[in-house]
Image (spheres, rainbow, N blue to C red):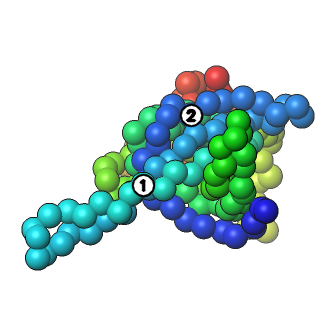
Amino acid sequence: MATKNATVTITGNIGNDPTYNTTRTGDAVVNFRVGSSSGYWNRSTGAWVDEGTSWYSVSAFRNLAEHAKASLRRGDPVIVTGALKVKEWENDGRKGISADIVADAIGHDLGQGTSAFVRRPHANAGAERPQVQAQGAPPATAETEAAEFPGEPAPEEHVDEWRANGMTVDDAAQGSTVDEEDAVFA
């Protein structure tokens, strides 16, 4: 018996360091387990009542796998959304039911702590981005792009680096940063 395609969102803690592999077709895949505990505060006894932990096997593919590999560690509180697949299994005379999630999105649970986001460049970041300009307007230069950013004009070498990584001066002004370490997937 297998059920699939139900979209779920869970919160919990990662129970193991995520493992990274590739599929036969070369796509990145990362796997880890998430333990989601539930319980409540019993006012009459003045104690926490633990209702147990449900465990989920989570898989992520392609870019999500690459980003998860770089971001997630054992013990991290996470929120996972994806397709749930529940299946019965049997191994050496033991029977059970597993709950697997193919993740669409994974993030740190900011209710439990803070996190820093680093935007990764797209695979085609080196490709020339089409330039959009108003009819009759002069082409954008470092000076005209920097003029939209309050403060000192951006040095030409920074603007060139931002453009090479698919960014504009506006992206940089909003706090996006790209440096050599961030531009390479290990």
Tell me which numbered mark, 2 or 1, is placed earlier along the sequence.
2
* Relative to 123, residue 149 above or below: below
**Which residue, given by chain and number where applicable, does mark 2 sit on?**
18
**Which residue, given by chain and number where applicable, does mark 1 sit on?**
53
Front residue (pair 169, 23): 23
Element assignment for label 2:
loop
Q: Amino acid at mark 1?
A: Thr
Confirm or deny contact between disc 2 and disc 1 (CB under 8 A). Answer: no
- Give left or right: position of 77 versus 94: left
Q: Residue at x 56, y 34 (%)?
A: 18
Residue 183 locus on image (x, y percent): 62, 30
Residue placed farthest to the front in the image?
93
Residue 117 locus on image (x, y percent): 47, 46
Front residue (pair 56, 10): 56
Marks 2 and 1, how far apart in space?
A: 19 Å
Residue 38 locus on image (x, y percent): 37, 63
Front residue (pair 124, 42): 42
